Image (cartoon, rainbow, N blue to C red):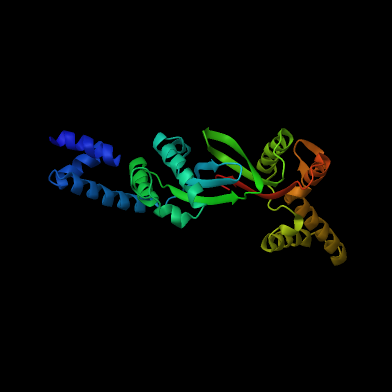
Amino acid sequence: MSDLEKIKKLRQSTGAGFKDCSSAIKESNGDLEKASEILRVKGISKASKKMSREAKEGVVALSGNDNITSLIEVNCETDFVAKNDDFVHFVKELSELNLQCKSDIEQLKKTKMKNGMTVDENLIAIIAKIGEKITLGRSKTIESESNLNFSYLHTVVKDNLSKLAVIVSLNTNQKNEKIKLFGKHLAMHVAASNPIALNSEDIDEDIIKKEQELITEELKSSGKPDEIIKKISLGKLNKFKEENSLLNQPWVMEPKKKVKEIIKDMNINGLKIDNFYRLKIGE
């Protein structure tokens, strides 16, 4: 086999560039197995050098069905790479594996992909090939046999890949068109309104504390008496809770009503929002 044929074969098996494959063939004295190992080591070295850079672009990938749905964020440095065919192919397969792993990232990294290499090994290889830092970000799987999951993708890059994705899970014993339409609209509502909890009382205490500090700092310079400041502060905090809890938000399709009022008006016995998750690149 000529060196050119070996280079072609090495490129097919590793995805590395012509120049890197040519150098590896020379360094290994024509041994393809050694050349492949040389490229692997060089790929790790290249990848480690890129890991100090920022990766704020990328895509969110969605996989699953009505009862189990997963989201995973994969970050890169530029939007150009987010649309690269190699990157897209990698993320789409990764998304299906993430569904199987139920968003256990450590398990996912060790899982083998179709080419026989683990996710971690493929990640190193694609960083070396594309030349950008690529990382696995946030991930979430919502699963329940008794619930129905609905999803929404905003700014779709390709198929199940987007810049913003939402899962909502409804507890209901019905699966009619009315429920399907509500589930779809609810996912769109979450995408637009970005609630941080289902109910006011579910908002994380650390978030409440931080907001309270910001409000207090803002009112300090007002010159108002402490008693008045306390009342204003309480009012602002309650407003913050209302605006950021899903059930208390104005319904995007009918802003004069709150989400909880829309659910009540639907008059479907037992219907309630069980869970939701919103994931946007860069947030």
Residue 190, percent from left and from top: 68, 43
Image quadrant in which the N terminus is located = top left
Task: Please state the total of marks drawn on the protein image.
Answer: 0
The quarter holding residue 149 reads top right
The quarter holding residue 256 reads top right
Residue 80, percent from left and from top: 45, 36
**Of residues 213 and 275, the one drawn nearer to the viewer in this rendering:** 275
Q: Is residue 227 visible?
A: yes
Residue 266, percent from left and from top: 80, 40
**Of residues 71 and 74, the one drawn nearer to the viewer in this rendering:** 71
Residue drawn 73% across the image and 51% down it = 244
Residue 173, percent from left and from top: 72, 44
Residue found at the very far bottom of the displayed protein: 226
The quarter holding residue 229 reads bottom right
**Of residues 174 and 220, the one drawn nearer to the viewer in this rendering:** 174
Q: Is residue 155 toward the left or the right of residue 131 in the image? A: right
Q: Is residue 76 visible?
A: no
Above or below — where is 244 with respect to 266?
below
Q: Is residue 89 toward the left or the right of residue 151 in the image? A: left
Above or below — where is 102 with respect to 184?
below
**Of residues 155 and 55, the one drawn nearer to the viewer in this rendering:** 155
Above or below — where is 5 with respect to 125?
above
Residue drawn 80% across the image and 41% down it = 262
